[in-house]
């Protein structure tokens, strides 16, 4: 894809800090080729003739960089969970969402990324979060748990730092049937083959993840979303999001 080739060239030509600083400029000029009225990004509210389609099938907004799952998450957050004077913990946030959430003066918004791959305020280990019990009204844990060796410890910590009445929004890649994990699968190549990505340690099933979260104390609701192909916001055609409450 042209976008991915351009991204590769820019990534090899400039340091990461320069790319992040100038990202809005790069995206503004790239966006001009995608202006239109057929679609709309619900994160940045830009109207488009099309989204950028990646090899994976994911569709990115050329202006803010939101992915299909980012747009679904943003829709959930805006419609149900964002309110004034709440404390939010967001693990490994996408830049598209962080850009908007961090500018909201009504939120106490804290970001964390343990490995330093994402811009973040903290570097919490999800299995040992350096926060007091009952610290957060809302936790966003999107595509994190599949990377964690002791995922049950991570779930226990999420529950511990969540306030009573608070919500934890969770998503991972999913498969039908049971959770698939095998501790003997250790190489990047084998993890890509069996788990779908070089740094993934398992593939959850929706019910399997719900059961583990329930074991940690959460009350869990499974939210299933279905959309027509090429829907206005280019949400995924089928998507599951789990909401754990305390």
Image: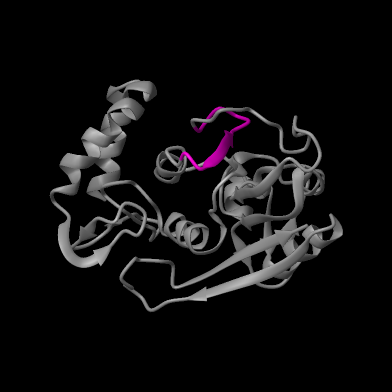
Which stretch did the figure color magenta? 105-118
Residue 9 occupies quadrant = top left
Residue appearing at x 60%, y 49% in the figure: 140
- The answer, for residue 159, to whether it is visible in the render is yes
In this picture, is 157 found above or below 169? above
Left or right relative to 187: residue 80: left
The x and y percentages for residue 191 are 63, 47
Left or right relative to 243: residue 44: left
Residue appearing at x 30%, y 22% in the figure: 14
The x and y percentages for residue 2 are 22, 47
Residue 188 occupies quadrant = top right
How many numbered discs sit on the rendered protein?
0
The x and y percentages for residue 68 are 41, 59
Based on the picture, tell me whether residue 106 belongs to the magenta stretch.
yes
Based on the picture, tell me whether residue 67 belongs to the magenta stretch.
no
Left or right relative to 125: residue 9: left
Residue appearing at x 52%, y 57% in the figure: 77
Q: Quadrant of the C terminus?
A: bottom right
Q: Nearer the viewer, residue 14 or 139?
A: 139
Residue 178 occupies quadrant = bottom right
The x and y percentages for residue 72 are 46, 62
């Amino acid at each position: 894809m042209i976008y991915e080739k351009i991204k590769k060239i820019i990534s090899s030509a400039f340091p990461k800090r320069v790319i992040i600083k100038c990202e809005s400029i790069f995206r503004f000029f790239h966006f001009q080729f995608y202006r239109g009225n057929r679609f709309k990004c619900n994160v940045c509210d830009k109207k488009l003739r099309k989204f950028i389609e990646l090899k994976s099938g994911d569709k990115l907004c050329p202006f803010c960089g939101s992915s299909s799952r980012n747009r679904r998450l943003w829709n959930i957050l805006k419609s149900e969970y964002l309110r004034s004077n709440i404390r939010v913990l967001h693990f490994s946030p996408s830049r598209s969402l962080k850009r908007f959430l961090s500018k909201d003066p009504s939120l106490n918004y804290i970001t964390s990324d343990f490995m330093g791959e994402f811009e973040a305020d903290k570097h919490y280990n999800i299995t040992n979060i350096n926060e007091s019990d009952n610290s957060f009204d809302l936790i966003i844990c999107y595509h994190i748990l599949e990377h964690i060796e002791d995922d049950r410890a991570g779930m226990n910590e999420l529950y511990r730092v969540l306030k009573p009445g608070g919500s934890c929004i969770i998503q991972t890649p999913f498969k039908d049937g049971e959770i698939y994990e095998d501790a003997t699968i250790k190489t990047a190549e084998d993890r890509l083959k069996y788990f779908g990505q070089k740094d993934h340690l398992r593939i959850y099933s929706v019910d399997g993840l719900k059961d583990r979260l329930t074991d940690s104390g959460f009350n869990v609701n499974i939210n299933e979303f279905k959309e027509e192909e090429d829907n206005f916001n280019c949400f995924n055609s089928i998507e599951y999001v789990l909401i754990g409450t305390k």
